[in-house]
Every structure is written in C-alpha cells, then in structure tokens.
Amino acid sequence: LIKIGLIREGKNPPDKRVPFSPLQAEEIEQRFPGVKIVCQESLIRCYKDDEYRELDIEVRRVVDDCDILMGIKEVPVDELIANKTYLFFSHTLKKQPYNRKLLQEALKKNIRLIDYEALKDGQGNRLVAFGRFAGIVGAFNGLWTYGKRYHAFSMRRAFECFDINDLKLELRKVKLPFVKIALTGAGRVAKGAMETLDTAGVRKVSPHDFLTLQFEEPVYTQISSADYHIRKEGGHFNREEFHQHPENYASNFKPYTRVADILLAGAFWNPKAPVLFSREDMLSPDFKIKIIADITCDIEGSVPSTKRPSTIPDPLYDYDASTDQVTPAFSNPNFVTVMAIDNLPCELPRSASEEFGRDLIDRILKPLLIEDTEGIVARGAIADGGKLTPTFSYLQDYVNTQSKT
C-alpha cells in the first residue's frame, strides 16, 4: 500500500489551493487500488475537511506515516520529514536565496524532492501548471480595474466568486467603451486571458488592424514575440534564435503603446530579452496605456511600472513615470494604474486546484506510482538520495553557500 498525504500549507500567507479535490482523491483510490489518500487537517484549504470525509477520505492531524507528501507552496524547513518523497513548488530552480535552506535541509534529510515546475515531457513542455488560471484571473482583474478607475461598471473581485463558472457570470457586467486592449504572449497564460476577454464579449482583431483601424466597439489583439521584436541586424524574426539569443533582438512595441488603453502582459520574459518599453517611452505624450495588468509580474522586468508585486487584498497601485515612484491607486489621472498580483490562481482556488489535480492524475500519477517509462518523474526530481540529481547539479554552488540568517 502506498500512502499519499495531502499536507497542510505552512507558508505565510497561506495558500488555499490543494493538489487534489475531494472527488479526485476518491477517483485516485478507485483507479489505483494499492493507493490510499490521507488528508492533513487544514482550516484554510478551499475544500473543507468535511468535503473529504464525506467521500470516505481519511482526514487527520498528522501524516508522518505517508510515503509521498504533496502540497502546493514551499514546505517550512522545520516541517520537512526525513526519507520521504515530496512534491511541491520549491522555487529553488533559479537559485532563489530565500529558499536555499529548504534545499539544504531536503538533501540533509535524504528527501526525494520533486518540483512541479520541473515535470516536463520529452520536448521540455511543462505537464502541470497554473498558468491558465493566472491568465483568466489576471485579465479579469484588468477589466475590473478599468471599471473602477473610470467608474464604468462594477464587478465582484475574482476571489469573491465561488468558482470559474461564477466568475464567467460576473463578466456579463463588463460595459466597456471603444477601448483597445493589447495582450502579449502565446502560452497558457495568454490563452487563459483570451478566455476571459472572449467571455466578456471583447472582439479579437489582428495586430495590423489593431494598429491601423478605428473600431465602434471594444477590441483586443494577441501579440506574440514575433509581432513586437525586430532583429538588430535586420532580416526575419527567427523563433528558435529569439529563444536561444534574445539579446540579438530589439523591442518594436512602441506602436502598440500609442493606440492601446489597457495592456495585459502575459508573455514569458527572459532577462536577456529587450524590455517591452522604457520609462522614457512612458513619459512621451503619445503613450496612451493607462492600465497595466502585469500577469507575469516580473519585478523591474519587461514592464518598467512593475516596481513591486501587489497582493490579493491590495491589488492596485499607480506608477508615476516622471519620478519612477509608486503611489496609491487612482491618485492622479496622469498616472498608470498597475495590477501585479503574483499569486493570481489563488483567487480561484477551487477551479485552479481541480484543473491542476486533473493534470496530475492524467500525466504524473502513473510514472510516480507505477512505472516512469519516459523518465518524467526522474527528470522532475531535484534531490534524491541526499544528492542533487544530474539535471540539477548546477544548483551545487547554491547549496554549498551558507545561508545568511
């Protein structure tokens, strides 16, 4: 018998998401006869303990006897149990200094640490992620911000909606004038954002029409890297080259800043790549964007106004390009209003957990529990047997450095 423990989230502020919904926990026990799910008691989880109990899933205070422990965010260092397999987002892959101790402890305690972010197929595509929900909620927040700033309409916040269906009903309240919305990106995040814009009845147009035509209705355009980057030495945009050597490209985003009212930033950004636009560009009289929902939330990244993350309780701030300072939201009609919540899927925790759990069941459980024929779990493990795995050996110097306490 293999026991999987769904651990209580210990990071502050606590995350309400969970790897499996109660129905999914029941499904796993039915589909994998040698597997039992145990749920650790939690007061903050989006699914109540009783919702698990109602389906005969065991709920208890301590889950130390489980073989595999699954959570969402980083596990507090002092709560790590030796000789276990853990799955969670460790936020160590980019050598984040605040999680060094976590990885050191996992190695010391002989923990097999599997990071959801590192679970990929043979082509390197991620198999489980919350990107779609970041996009859905990020675009919703962008529209909500517009309604609030211009007193155009009012909606409940995303986190006040029960689930995604409730959120989609709320989008019926959107009443936009003839605005133009620019959305960057082509991945999961951008697809989620488009879902929201389509539900809100905003029409999609081509980048060319967006830049050259006037419309008698609100419209949006989705722009991928090829639409706003040019090769410094001339010649055509080459996707492969752009991913390998983004420094060979310059940004050509300025035309969009002259016609767009709202920017939804949903593109993955490589620090070697050019920024979308500069603070100087924002000072230009023809810079038209007044609302920026930075869904990717890269601090001091591709969007100069993203000076810090915002939070679910305090989602907005204004940016004054002339002083490069952040001020309270709606403090001056000349400022740009920024939404840069860095944990957007947490606003719709039930639906986000459900989709995440679906991917885990369909793509990860067989390699995790039965046989890992394609090496998915092997590639996703950062630490195993007290050592870093070969793929993550680049973290050795990060681990060897003493943490400053």
Image: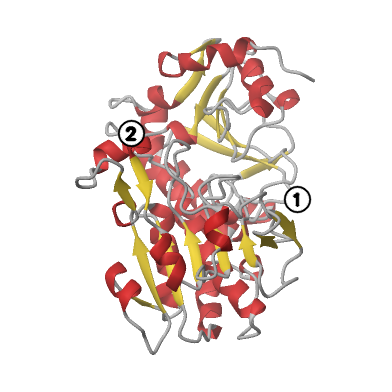
Cα separation, mark 2 vs mark 1, equals 47 Å
- Point out the residue furthest to the right here: 405
313 vs 20: above or below = below
165 vs 74: above or below = below
Q: Nearer the viewer, residue 240 or 31?
A: 240
Render colour scheme: secondary structure
Disc with the residue nearer the chain's start (2 vs 1): 1
Amino acid type assigned to the residue bearing label 1 in the image: Leu
Amino acid type assigned to the residue bearing label 2 in the image: His
Q: Quadrant of the C terminus?
A: top right
367 vs 309: above or below = above
Toward which corner of the image does residue 239 lie, by quadrant?
Answer: top left
Q: Which residue is at 46% across, 78% downward?
A: 200
Q: At which x and y percent is residue 134?
A: 51, 56
| Marker disc for residue 43 | 1
| Marker disc for residue 245 | 2
Q: Which residue is at 52% across, 10% downward?
A: 385
Please, what secondary structure does the residue beneath circle 2 have?
loop
400 left or right, relative to 261: right
Q: Nearer the viewer, residue 345 or 7?
A: 345
- Foreground tag (2 vs 1): 2
